[in-house]
Amino acid sequence: MTDSSRHDLMVRRLLVDLNQPFSRHWNGGSAFRTAFANALSMSFPLGEQFFMESVQQGLKLLPNDPAHDDLRRNGKDFVGQEATHRHLHARFNQVLSDQGLVNHWQTRIRGRIEWARQRSAKASARSRALHELAVTAAFEHFTAVFGEQTLARRDQAGDWFEGAEPALKTLWCWHASEESEHKNLAFDLYQALGGHHAGRVRWFVYVGLTFAFDSLRQTVNNLWHDGTLFQWRTWRDGLRFFWGRHGLIWSCLPELLAYFRRDFHPSHSGQSELAQQWLTAHQHLWIAVNPRPVSSN
């Protein structure tokens, strides 16, 4: 039995205009925090396309059993949410390109996907699906943990988007909320198709190492093009962001390490309610594409 049926997912259209240019250091004037967030955004369009495809392939392999109906329905809405994220971050990334930043991360993502699919071309459909779902579930855990910490620190000490331009802070909080909302899906689908603990842990380690390398490399590249790479303030902010009292490392490490437990499930996170709180408080900023049915209870 999976946990994806606990909450029906909702596809939303965010009412934020990303066609307008924004400042070079839009994240509170901090070159480092801006460069890091920009780096993450650069990975999203291709990364989320991969997540969508892995879930779609996994759904095709689910047994024709009514017990999986909720997983199928939420799987389609997962794809809808990720498609919206991909679209908006592609627009965001176009502004970054106009500012002179160069997206090298997407080239590495594309190369890894092509290499992995070539190597698995002769494997069974189920084997390929489990591999890609394990990678997707690992990335989804990272994004959910980062997202929930973003929401937990919003407008408080250690807010990672303190002073950010309002429209962009809305974009990141909305994205964080939906990542938390659908964090169970890929994991549950992997489990439903017979995925095992060793496989998901092995790919989680791989994802963690490549994510750390790629995000830092793209951040440094962004700072280079920004002209702020060698400024002392840049790396002061970077050290504080990662290792400070409210830094990303200390905030996220316990939840990330929880993935190694055999009894782990994404729904065990203690921050899951923050997403619904933000989405409810900011209903004026989005429109439901697939409204949830009203309960008769």
Image (spheres, grey):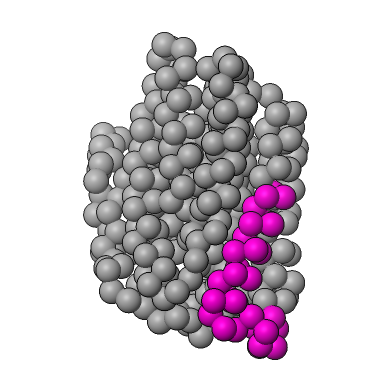
**Quadrant into which the N terminus falls:** top right
**Quadrant into which the C terminus falls:** top left
**Range drawn in magenta:** 208-236
Residue 253 relative to residue 88: left or right: right
Q: Is residue 242 above or below residue 129?
A: below
Q: Residue at x 27, y 68 (%)?
A: 19
Q: Residue at x 52, y 27 (%)?
A: 189
State the residue in front, 85 or 216. Answer: 216
Q: Is residue 228 magenta?
A: yes
Is residue 134 in view from this perspective? yes
Q: Is residue 87 above or below residue 295?
A: below
Q: Is residue 290 magenta?
A: no
Q: Is residue 88 above or below residue 3?
A: below
Q: Is residue 267 above or below residue 157?
A: above
Residue 87, given in percent of the width and then of the height, sits at 34, 53
Q: Residue at x 43, y 42 (%)?
A: 49
- Secondary structure mostly seen in magenta is helix
Name of the residue lying farthest toward the top: 64
Q: State the image quarter where residue 260 is shown.
A: top right
Residue 153, given in percent of the width and then of the height, sits at 56, 70
Q: Residue at x 50, y 61 (%)?
A: 103
State the residue in front, 176 or 292. Answer: 176
Q: State the image quarter where residue 157 is shown.
A: bottom right
